[in-house]
């Protein structure tokens, strides 16, 4: 139960931020516009890397991660894969509902700074930040014995880069990403905290009677 309080705090902070954004709080809007304008594409290879991370760093990385952990992760890996699957199944519809309810418009940036131009859904929270932060949190907290930690740290770095890339390519405000991280981490901690109720699932996936 040690993760319950941190989860509650993160989700409460997300709720406060969501209310501020839904009411177009002037300080939040000012911060977002200022911070977004300070993240300028520099051109060249970095732009291409950020576009690749933004387009493919979520589903094309994290779905295979779950599959690899189920198949090759042994007891710890399969348990982590269960946590990841449950967190993702909660966050995908939850994130969509929140996006629809708040309905924040995507940033308006000049064409030369907008590296991805086909984003049409609402902006808050960043769905990419929600998913990758949840995944990284679960990995770092549950798949961290011996050499496992190397795998988890690499994916934690990947998650941070994906979240940053969403601002870099011009499709999200910084607060969209921060909100996504708060929601993703908060829900993932709640899922881990509920682990003792999942023992029948863990027993089944590990092939025990």
Image (tube, grey):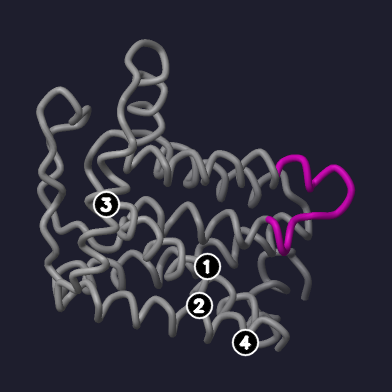
What residue is shown with label 2? 10
How much space separates mark 3 and mark 4, taking CA atoms? Answer: 29 Å
Residue 202 position (above or below residue 120):
below
> So how many labels did they put on this image?
4
Q: Are marks 1 and 2 in contact (CB under 8 Å)?
A: yes
Residue 147 location, quadrant: top right
Q: Is residue 95 left or right of residue 45?
A: left
**Residue 14 locus on image (x, y percent):** 39, 76
The residue lying at 79 percent from left, 55 percent from top is: 144
Residue 141 position (above or below residue 16):
above
Q: Is residue 201 left or right of residue 60?
A: right
- Dot in front, 3 or 4: 3
- Dot in front, 3 or 2: 3
**Residue 70 locus on image (x, y percent):** 64, 52
Residue stretch rendered in magenta on the structure: 140-151
Q: Is residue 185 magenta?
A: no
What residue is shown with label 1? 185
How much space separates mark 3 and mark 2, taking CA atoms? Answer: 19 Å
Q: Are marks 2 and 4 in contact (CB under 8 Å)?
A: no
In the rendering, which numbered label is found on residue 113?
none
In the rendering, which numbered label is found on residue 4?
4
Q: Earlier in the sequence, mark 3 or mark 2?
A: 2
How much space separates mark 1 and mark 4, taking CA atoms? Answer: 12 Å
Between 150 and 60, the one lying in front of the other is 150
Q: Are marks 3 and 4 in contact (CB under 8 Å)?
A: no
What residue is shown with label 3? 173
């Amino acid at each position: 139960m040690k993760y319950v309080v941190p989860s509650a705090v993160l989700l409460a902070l997300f709720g406060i931020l969501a209310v501020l954004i839904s009411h177009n709080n002037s300080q939040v809007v000012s911060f977002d516009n200022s911070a977004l304008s300070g993240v300028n594409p520099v051109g060249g290879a970095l732009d291409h890397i950020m576009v690749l991370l933004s387009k493919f760093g979520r589903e094309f990385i994290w779905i295979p991660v779950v599959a690899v952990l189920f198949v090759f992760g042994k007891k710890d890996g399969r348990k982590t894969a269960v946590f990841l699957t449950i967190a993702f199944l909660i966050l995908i519809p939850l994130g969509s509902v929140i996006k629809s309810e708040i309905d924040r418009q995507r940033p308006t940036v000049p064409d030369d700074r907008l590296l991805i131009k086909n984003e049409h859904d609402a902006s808050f929270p960043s769905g990419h930040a929600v998913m990758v932060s949840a995944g990284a949190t679960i990995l770092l907290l549950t798949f961290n014995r011996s050499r496992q930690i190397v795998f988890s740290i690499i994916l934690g770095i990947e998650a941070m880069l994906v979240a940053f890339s969403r601002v870099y390519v011009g499709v999200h405000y910084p607060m969209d990403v921060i909100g996504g991280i708060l929601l993703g981490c908060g829900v993932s901690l709640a899922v881990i905290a509920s682990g003792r109720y999942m023992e029948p699932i863990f027993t089944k996936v590990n092939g025990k009677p």
